[in-house]
Amino acid sequence: MEKFTRHTGVGVPLRRSNVDTDQIIPAVHLKRITRTGFEDALFSAWRADPAFVLNQDAYRNGSVLVAGSDFGTGSSREHAVWALKDYGFRAVLSPRFADIFRGNSGKQGLLAAQVAPEDIELIWKILETRPGTQVTVDLVARTATCDDVVVPIAVDDYTRWRLMEGLDDIGLTLQHADDITAYEASREAWRPRTLPAKHLPVVPVQAARAVSGPTRTR
Amino acid sequence: MAGTLAEKVWQAHVVRRGENGAPDLLYVDLHLVHEVTSPQAFEGLRVAGRPVRRPDLTIATEDHNTPTLDIDRPIADLTSRTQIETLRANAAEFGIRLHSLGDSDQGIVHQVGPQLGLTMPGLTVVCGDSHTSTHGAFGALAFGIGTSEVEHVLATQTLPLAPFRTMAITVDGRLPPGATSKDVILAIIARIGTGGGQGYVLEYRGEAIRALSMEARMTICNMSIEAGARAGMIAPDETTFAYLEGRPHAPEGADWDAAVEYWRTLRSDDDATFDAEVVLAAKDIEPFVTWGTNPGQGLPLSADVPDPAQIADESARVAAQRALEYMGLTPGQPLRSITVDTVFIGSCTNGRIEDLRSVAKVLKGRRKAESVRVLVVPASARVRLQAEAEGLDRIFLDFGAEWRNAGCSMCLGMNPDQLAPGERAASTSNRNFEGRQGKGGRTHLVSPLVAAATAIRGTLSSLADLDLPAGETFDGSPLAPLDPRLLVQV
């Protein structure tokens, strides 16, 4: 994972709360089997609107998203993080993040930094008054700077350390493989195993067919 | 030391305690896999040359992308087909059990685990799907994870997890007739908000929860994530044990006895403290519907569409204005006056046999409203087989509904089952986000009973709106008690 210590880029004001992951990337775009190539899918429904913030020239090349509260709610799709990264975002600031989204961001080197609602409002006003203003997010100093405004950002210590070191979780965990093996030896016999497979008798499943007449199912 | 249910399950799975602010490393008992969030995880293993540590604690099924028609023919959507074929290739390469489309054990991943008896009290269960919270109904600690975490679990069978807080949600008393577990969870989300549960594991308690069947409990835990909580739990009891006993993967003999003895200890101690507590009175819970574009924007069906101007909080007011614009609704309009185009009955929230039974009981002998399209999509192939064994399919077809094969279907519209732009649905699923069921589609979340009444009348309705034949009560109870010994067990 790429290290993250400090980043400066154009700030994008997204004046909306409850931005769920279905808005960040609708389900129809989840069918790729790679981790990249999701940039066009980012906010695809909203980007159809010419007035949407990312369709304005000053914000088009933004890399710091400044959003309302409860960012990333809903579906666990990590594609939401990939789409933000593929588009060019390196950091998202919000008063509150959904738990799964925040976790996914940390795994992918996208900084999800918590900022007080009044500070978000302050940054929004600057970015809206002077579109194209840059925001500097400093993970070492735990601050975000926009013009002459410097506000504190909150990131939990462990995620901050991993981001700054660019560490891969699986590698870290596998250093403790002996602990995992020891734990496995203590597991009770009643705990389930999926193999060998057990199930009820296999019964043929009839394929449903479209009803006659017009159907609005696309 | 006194502990909550969630803390007890957590403590039993700590492989290694985190030091210096690092999270605890937790063991995962059961890992459920589906086609959408797994391809990049398997690719990561391949690139790193890592095997799957415990194929015997892993199970995969095809659900999100699968068509619900013509399942015996090649999948028409090429990208969907590629994703499903990728899962099949990955399962074969890494030695993972897979229930494919057409197999009688295929279905939505959150139905497959419970119906096979793999989901049990006291487990840790994860899946690359936020509705993994469903399995908490058994007293398991179950939560959705992202694809990087899927890869982590495949490689190590563990996850580093930041500590959570605990919230007790107590529903006292008894639910009135016509009110279901779906109405309970929609009322809870409306109360605490879509972010209210963030950072918490919810524990549902109280007389009304205890009285629920396993399937109704799954509906409640399923939507914990809609309140922002990664996990929701219910302490296991006799209802849980009765559901599990005799299922294909349930423990047997001495293992069963040992398991039940342990499971009985899985309850929050009387003197345990929760970080937050919420109490609801069951008697106040009515059939509930959503009017907006997040699951917290809901009201009793008897209410009117809210007026954003009356909402004090600015952020909530702006969100409500935007939601009403998207939904095409007018403040003050009675919710009961809203006409729908489609009724969707299905999903991991409400696509189980009891849901289908309660819907069939209402629909029997009636015809759908002329202008409404009605889709009935069972949560799994076994649920479909069971419904057919009971003759429910005939009731749906005679009513004018479409009877489909199993899968996630219109809940998220990854397959062809989608709303057209501007089309309005009453849906028994879990999310009413903009475009969730199809670009421009408008979703009202409802219980199966409200869905059934709405399919009959064409406008958002409850059982109270139906002309009931003399002597019929329609209290929402299932047609017959669930018999776990039936040929097809669901």
Image: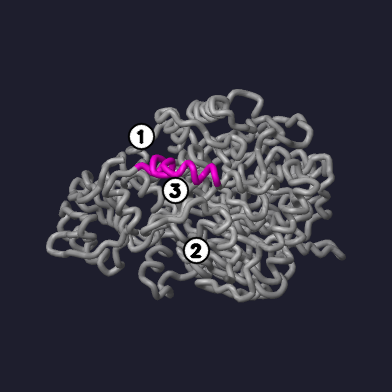
Badge 3 and badge 2 in a common chain: no
Residue A76: x %, y % from top left? 47, 48
Q: Which residue is mark 2?
A: B200
Q: Amino acid at mark 2?
A: Tyr
Nearest to viewer (mark 2 / mark 1):
2
Q: Is there any visible trace of residue B392 in the rendered image?
A: yes
Residue range highlighted in magenta: A168-182
Q: Nearer the viewer, residue A4 or B175?
A: A4
Q: Report whether B140 appears left or right of B211.
A: left
Comparing marks 1 and 3, which lies closer to the viewer? 1
Q: Position of residue B414 (x, y in %)?
A: 52, 39
Q: Are marks 3 and 2 in contact (CB under 8 Å)?
A: no
Q: Amino acid at mark 3?
A: Asp
Q: Look at label 1 and name its amino acid.
A: Thr
Q: Nearer the viewer, mark 3 or mark 2?
A: 2
Tell me, yes or no, whether the highlighted magenta stretch contains residue A17.
Answer: no
Instruction: Give the distance between the C-alpha atoms of the residues marked 2 and 1, in whole angstroms.
Output: 32 Å
Mark 3 Cα-neighbour bin, 10 Å: few <14, some 14–19, many ≥20: many
Q: Decide: is B221 above or below A196.
A: below
